[in-house]
Image: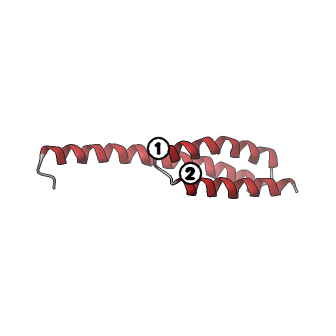
Amino acid sequence: MANTTSAKKATRKIARRTDINKARRSRVRGFLRLVEEAISSGDQAAAAAALKAAQPELMRATSKGVVHANTAARKISRLSSRVKALSA
């Protein structure tokens, strides 16, 4: 357990940041799930709308350091190609 005052404060800060990051990660997963559900239902318009809503959330998580930039780019790329394939 932390002994010094600064270590105790660091522990409190880490706990606070962990809660915030968990909430952000959960929010992103929810947006991604909506895109997945729209793709599986076969509704191209709903999937495109869900993807358009999910992209800024992923980028926001990236800018906050919750998700790596390449991970976000990969997810967006793969989802957009799947949404595009629905129209074909």
Give, as a three-letter code, the residue at label 1: Lys
Q: Earlier in the sequence, mark 2 or mark 1?
A: 2
Quadrant in which the N terminus is drawn: bottom left
Residue 39, numbered circle: none
Does residue 1 sit above or below 60 in this rendering? below
Q: Residue at x 53, y 45 (%)?
A: 27
Is label 1 in a helix, a strand or a loop?
loop
Give, as a three-letter code, the residue at label 2: Arg
**71 or 83: nearer the viewer:** 71
Instruction: Give the residue furthest to the right.
Output: 88
Residue 64, numbered circle: 1
Image x and y of residue 8, in percent: 18, 46
Q: Which residue is mark 2?
A: 29
Q: Is residue 82 left or right of residue 63?
A: right
Mark 1, Cα crowd under 10 Å, few <14 / some 14-19 / many 20+, is few
Q: Residue at x 54, y 52 (%)?
A: 69
Q: Residue at x 75, y 58 (%)?
A: 82
